[in-house]
Amino acid sequence: MPVAVITGASLGLGRALAHALAETGWSLVLDARHPEPLTRATADLPGGPHRVLAGDVTDPAHRADLVAAAADLGGADLLVNNASTLGRSPLPAFADLDPTTYARILEVDVVAPMALAAGLLPQLRARAGRVLNISSDAAVEPYETWGGYGSAKAALDHASRVLGAEEPGVRVYAVDPGDMRTAMHQDAFPGEDISDRPLPETVVPRLVALLDARPESGRYRAEDFG
């Protein structure tokens, strides 16, 4: 039974991917910051065994708990770094971005996912595993007011490339899932109607197709699969 660690699993893409993998026989280690939404999101997960641990991915002790939970299930075959933050809403111009907020964005969106990947590497190496880092088109396009988030995702993209080069036995992907109708996307456009964006569930089959195809490590767009 393969094992996946998924961060940010209480909402949006993380929740949708968790349910899709559980339905196909994966055991899961699931994380989100707030326990109540995470409990609600995982209450009806099929299959198992699963481990559900609320906490902050920037906390080294919490990351260690996730690594230990994966080991308890037999070892991670997949890490999905989905947890992320925009900083604050509405998004400010780069010149107005508070340095403390920017540091938090970098910590959540770059440092924590790469640290979790490092912690899980012994398990991933043993299973020729995969790391799926959720990126964004903001990593490559200069959208106004997206400087903090976009530069963090650009850093995550490059860190993913480096890790992929250093770990030839592990596939490391930075994947742009495209626009989705999620709480985070709504936070980026407060007061606007985003009902025309696709639901995260429509993106999940493309991510699964990418994982099944096992291409070389690199940056990909979900729309190119499935």
Image (spheres, helix red, strand yellow):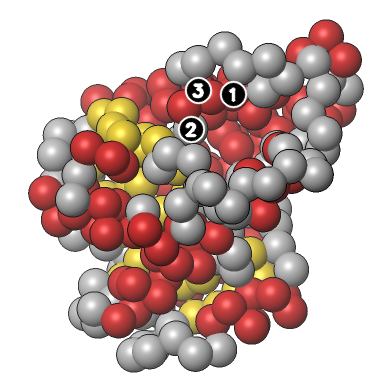
The residue that mark 3 highlights is 139
Kind of element beneath mark 3: helix
Asked if the residue under mark 1 is in contact with the one under mark 2, i.e. CB atoms within 8 Å, the reply is yes
For residue 66, say whether it is visible.
Answer: no
Helix, strand or loop status at disc 2: loop
Label disc, if present, on residue 150 of the rendered structure = 1
Mark closer to the chain start, 2 or 1? 2
Percent from the top left, x then y, of residue 85? 68, 42
Q: Which is more N-terminal, label 3 or label 1?
A: 3
Dot 1 lies on which element? helix
The amino acid marked with disc number 2 is Ser
Q: Residues within 10 Å of mark 3 (few under 14, many from 20)?
A: many
Q: Tell me where residue 53 sits by quadrant.
A: bottom right
Camera-nearest residue between 201 and 24: 201
Q: Nearer the viewer, residue 173 or 111?
A: 173
**Coordinates of residue 168 in the picture (x, y in percent):** 17, 35
- Residue under the point 77% across and 36% down: 87
Q: Nearer the viewer, residue 68 or 94?
A: 94
Instruction: Indicate left or right for 144 with 191 as reference.
Output: left
Which image quadrant is residue 225 in?
Answer: top left
For disc 2, the marked residue is 136
Residue found at the very far top of the displayed protein: 95
Q: CA distance from mark 1 to mark 3?
A: 5 Å
Pointer 2 with pointer 3, Cβ within 8 A:
yes
Instruction: Name the kind of residue labelled 3 in the image.
Output: Ala
Judge whether 130 appears above or below 51 on screen: above
Q: Residues within 10 Å of mark 1 (few under 14, many from 20)?
A: many
Residue at x 74%, y 68% (from the top left corner)? 34
